[in-house]
Amino acid sequence: MEKIKDRFQGCRIAKVLSLLAALVMPICVLDMGTTDVIMELINPYYLLFCGFYGCIFLCLSWERKWLWLKIVLSIINAVINFFFIFIAFMGGVGGPLLALLQMIIPIVPWLHIFG
């Protein structure tokens, strides 16, 4: 695990990509409250994995001195993901389960239940 962490911490591209991936969901939520441009193009449930994996890679790639950035972005993304999973309860018990699966396994072509 330390080898992977050292490899990520030395790569600037990994740092930038992890930061951008961690910022996707907060930007989409801000857009939802203001202009709603991004949300007309893509369903936010298809972007849950960006917030989830963005925070994981953010914690792996940034050094210890950026702990405040890791904590703030992780909390923001966790609140946003839990908010979308809570909204998914309107689809019954299967809604949150499908949202969790979309968050963890983004590659599988999911049915368009939310869209």
Image (cartoon, helix red, strand yellow):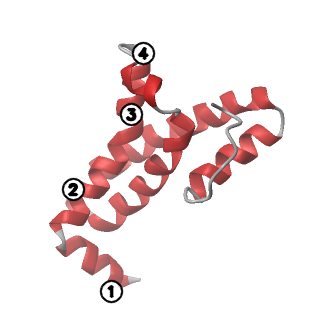
Residue that carries the numbered disc 2 in the rendered image? 16
| Labelled disc at residue 88 | none
Q: CA distance from mark 4 to mark 1?
A: 41 Å
* Closest to the observer, 7 or 45: 45
- For marks 3 and 1, the one nearer the N-term is 1
Where disc 3 sits, the SS reads: helix
Q: Residue at x 37, y 13 (%)?
A: 34
Looking at the rendered structure, the kind of residue marked 1 is Lys
Q: Point out the residue furthest to the right here.
A: 93
Mark 1 or mark 2, which is nearer the start of the sequence? 1
Q: Is residue 67 visible?
A: no
**Residue 26 location (% of width, % of height):** 38, 33
Residue 33 — which label?
4
Viewed as shown, does residue 41 lie left or right of 108?
Answer: left
Residue at 32% x, 76% y: name it.
5
Residue 21 lies, with reference to residue 115, above or below; the image says below
- Mark 1 lies on a secondary structure that is helix
Specify the amino acid type for callout 4. Answer: Gly
Give the residue pinned by disc 1. 3
Considering the numbered disc 2 on the image, is that residue within a helix, a strand or a loop? Answer: helix
Density class for disc 4 (Cα within 10 Å; few <14, some 14-19, many ≥20) is few
| Tag 3 residue | 26
Distance (Cα) linking label 2 and label 1: 19 Å
Q: Do the residues bearing badges 2 and 4 touch, measured as CB atoms within 8 Å?
A: no
Residue 64 screen position, x and y as percent: 25, 64
| Badge 3 amino acid | Pro
